[in-house]
Image (spheres, coloured by chain):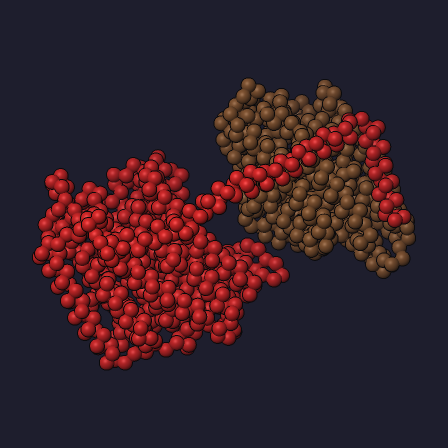
Chain colours: A brown, B red
Amino acid sequence: MNILIAITAVGVLAMLSEILNFRRFLYPISLFVMLVALALTGMEWSHGVRYFNDMLYMDNYAVVFTGIMVVTTLLWFMMNENFLNGNPRQADFTAIISFALGGAMVMAGFSDLIMLFLGVEILSISMYVLAASNKSEPRSNEAGFKYFLMGAFASGFLLFGIALVYGATGSFNLREISEFVSENNTDMSAIFYGGVLMIAAGLAFKVAAAPFHFWAPDVYEGSPTPFTAFMSTVVKTAAFAAFLRLFSTCFSEVSTWWSPVLAIMSALSMLVGSIMALRQTSLKRLLAWSGVANAGYMLMAVVSLNEYSDTALVLYAAAYSIASIGIFTLVSNMTNAGNEEISSLHGFSKVNRFPALVITVLMFSIAGIPPLAGFFGKYAIFAGALKDGFVWLAVVAVLSSAISVFYYLKVVVAMFQPAGREAVQLEFNPGQSLVLGLVLVLVVVLGLVPALITTLI
Amino acid sequence: MEQFIWLIPALPLLGFLINGIGNKSVPRGMSGLVASITVLGGFILSVVLFLQLLSDPNLVIQQKLFTWMATSTMEVDFGFMVDRLSVIMLLVITGVGFLIHVYSMGYMHEEPDYARYFAYLNLFVFFMLILVLGSGYLMMFVGWEGVGLCSYLLIGFWFKNNDYNAAASKAFIMNRIGDLGFLLGMFLMLQTFGSLSYDKVISGASTMSVGTPVLTAIALLLFVGAMGKSAQLPLYTWLPDAMAGPTPVSALIHAATMVTAGIYMVVRSNVIYVLAPFASEIVLIVGILTALLAAFVGLKQTDIKKVLAYSTVSQLGLMFVALGLGAYKTALFHVVTHAFFKALLFLCSGSVIHAMGGEQDMRKMGGLKKALPITHLTFLIGTLAITGIPPFAGFFSKDEIMASAFATNGWIFALVCFCALLTAIYMFRLYFLTFHGEFRGSQHQQEHLHESPASMTTPLIVLAILSTIGGFIGMPEIMHAPHLLSRFLKPVTAMAESYTSLHVTHTFEYILLVSSVSILAIVIWFSHRKYAVQKHVPAAPQELSGFQWVLHNKFFVDEFYDAIIVRPLRMVSSLGYRWIEQGFIDGIVNGFGTVATSLSAALRYLQSGAIGFYMIAMVISFIVVFFIQMFL
């Protein structure tokens, strides 16, 4: 609860800062409040308090996901020091990002379908605005518009699904729904099943899983890079936290019914994402497609619902968020230099040794090479799928991983090639170097001792 | 004290970081000092630990650092464990290690890459401490691999010489073969006992009956690991080549500590070996064969360090004989005394090489007694200790191995005695050739002969004292003094002792004492007459014939390995490269890539950017999903 207050307080403060004229303090304040929020998150751990008449349940699952998202947002603030400070719309951006984080937190901790919908909407509306925030850039406008139209469409699916589930079970509360389902799991009405399917489609849109992924590459590419970074980390983590929370608490009794269709979506996402990423020459668009493929991997955790799904998803989401934030530090510098092409990275390692090293390690991690964090995330998820009997899905996942190694390493190879004519000078400010140092440590430490995070749940 | 155990390995690690990161910006005087002081700190902490363990016979300090991974069927932790066995190893590693660090400051003073040398040396001490401090086989393996790495780095320290690089690679690869055995042994343990921690493995094993096949398999696999690290047949050939490294490294890593890791491992797993008599027999046979073969080869070597290297292999073989006989405490006793006198001998040879300006061939030495008085005296003590003359340290431990052999099997006893005789022959040959007779080197070398500086001679003196009195920790029964080491180690080997009884009569011990001393006296007299009085010099290699020629060429083992392993492997690999790699695998991979990229080209048309199409696609997808789910 206090976390939610702290996070939204940043938003309110940010808006006040324009009126009361203390914008120059806003950046340190937001960093400080994020640290406070992290501490508050830690204090919630293992208490399992239910707030607002059981609308929000801060169990360890919610706490760990909130922790990951708060850390990611903190890193996000650190990497965007230059972008935010001095920007005339710094207050707007800080406020909207804070509200989005608040929505994300609600999505990790909801215990009522209304809360789920509220969380999704708070997060999504914030992101629509941010995607379109570069008003002078047509691509940004297009991205915002596309995201908004299609997102509204998907919210319609979600809301309709929630209504159908309410109609079938008579409750919005997760505990009551799950009790109802386990009592009547043999003779649930078709309305209920239709509702589950529509919720699945709505959430699949939010996580950008195929075939509901069409918006993702265009929106990721068109949005200003800092917000793309936020989308591919916090938004994705929140959407998956909600997905798994809902399906594992409420619908696990009927999982045999819905898991095949989610398995197909998962396989499709992995293949489409990986195959499309192969041809991309822009790093930002490549990451967008890799985001689709990663949505497929994470969806496997929902498909193969077992007692390790939570830990597997947490590990994967943490590894993915950390690596993405690090890589987007590079991309945002490339955007500033006006060239997002991979080929513009030639000669990068000569000038920026440390960033090149970190990005290489991150690419290795995200490609799933041991002993880095990404490997254990993938391992946990693949092992879960095998355990649940989805052998074919695991085979597809391994194949798609093999393809993904190619395009991740393409970036690494480019960095270590001799400089050509296209080469651009990139500069990393101290905050960004610190972010890179931190993510390097996190990726290595989580790889050596995954138990640090998996034992928290 | 318990909460400070982590400091023991952390100190050398700190030294490594200072010297490794600072490298050439660390002042020369500082890097050696930092390296030595961190090891000294470890030694002081080990002494405190030792005193604590001494006062409480049942004390075993266990400290869990973190769980590496845990599943329902197994749990693997990282943690420290200090018991009476590990504390003895700690004392030897940090104590002898410290002396060798001090010696290195003098020996390496002309070396431009001073800081790198000490960084590696500190890193080695760190990993060696991890090896003995671990609470389970996994941690042992981490240290095991780490010391292997440091050994590789230090053998190839002068990496500009390609022969040295080859020697380093050889050591690394040979050890890798052994490590595979260790690794398989660990997997088997994990499957059998569900854990790799010593207490769980030991308690699990002790409930099994004698000769359980899985225990025999584990014991044999672990022993393969020990063969690599402790240079036993057939994986011993790397150790003589490892002498390419700086001499203090040979003393520390390839004589006193790292190569005894295999013995430590077997003593640590003694319960498994006691319950696997077949594996113990293999250990015994491999040990005695190695001891004899290496001793024979040592007879005809002319390089001063090579003789000592073969002598190390031979002594390690004797330790494995003791292990195979079930005399675990005796093996450890010999590890300790061997660490003293072999480190001493190597450091003395370093002092000689230093004085001779890098010359290692004994045929060019002689008469160094006058120029190097301290080195001469300490070397003599080391020689007396290794050959087993009372009351020097080697006598007590070797006597114990002989007694254990006599109590078990007459043949083994005879072979061990023969091996001891060979040891005496090559050691006194080495001693008289180097220090007696006339100087055979060049005029230039003769003018520059000098005793080494105090930083080098002080460690020699300390080690000489230890080699003299070190044996008193394990007096035989007839001396009517307590066997301190045996008493101290009782809790570790209690189970093994209930299975094997190695007791000999007092009469036998007297006979052994008198006969060994008199035989050794004859050997000394012969060597003295041949090399000091008659001034016999070993012939050049091309003049050798028959068995001597075979011995000088080390039984052609290297050539044999080259013919049956290296060359066929090269052939298979070049065939594989041409047909399988380039033809088959590349074809598949490229084909896979071509298919994926062309698919990607086709799929691109779907991503048109038109929002209307996207929404239609979503709706159609949902309808398809809906129909499949609801109606099929």
Along the line of sight, the residue nearer the viewer: A50 or A174 = A174
Dividing the picture into quadrants, the one containing residue A149 is: top right
Query: In the figure, is residue B443 to the left or right of B471?
Result: left
Where does the image place residue B463, in percent across and percent down from the top left? 24, 57
* Rendered residue at 24%/54% (across/down): B549
Q: Is residue B623 above or below residue B341?
A: above
Q: Is residue A324 above or below residue A51?
A: above
Toward the left, the furthest residue is B533
Q: Residue at x 53, y 59 (%)?
A: B187
Asked if residue A129 can be seen in this view, the reply is no
Q: Position of residue B52 (x, y in %)?
A: 37, 65
**Total numbered labels:** 0
Q: Residue at x 52, y 41 (%)?
A: B577
Looking at this rendering, what residue extends furthest in the front direction?
B546
The residue positioned 72% from the left and 54% from the top of the image is A389
Task: State whether residue B597 is above or below residue B442.
Answer: above
- Which of the pair B244/B130 is nearer the observer? B244
> Of residues A10 and A117, which is closer to you in this image?
A117
Indicate the quadrant where residue B90 lies. bottom left
Q: Position of residue B178 (x, y in %)?
A: 43, 56
Q: Is residue B48 positioned above or below B161 on the image? A: below
Q: Is residue B384 left or right of B609 when viewed as pictured?
A: left
Is B360 on the left-hand or right-hand side of B266? left
Q: Is residue B131 visible?
A: yes
Quadrant where the image shows the N terminus of chain B? bottom left
Residue B331 lies, in percent from the top left, at 34, 66
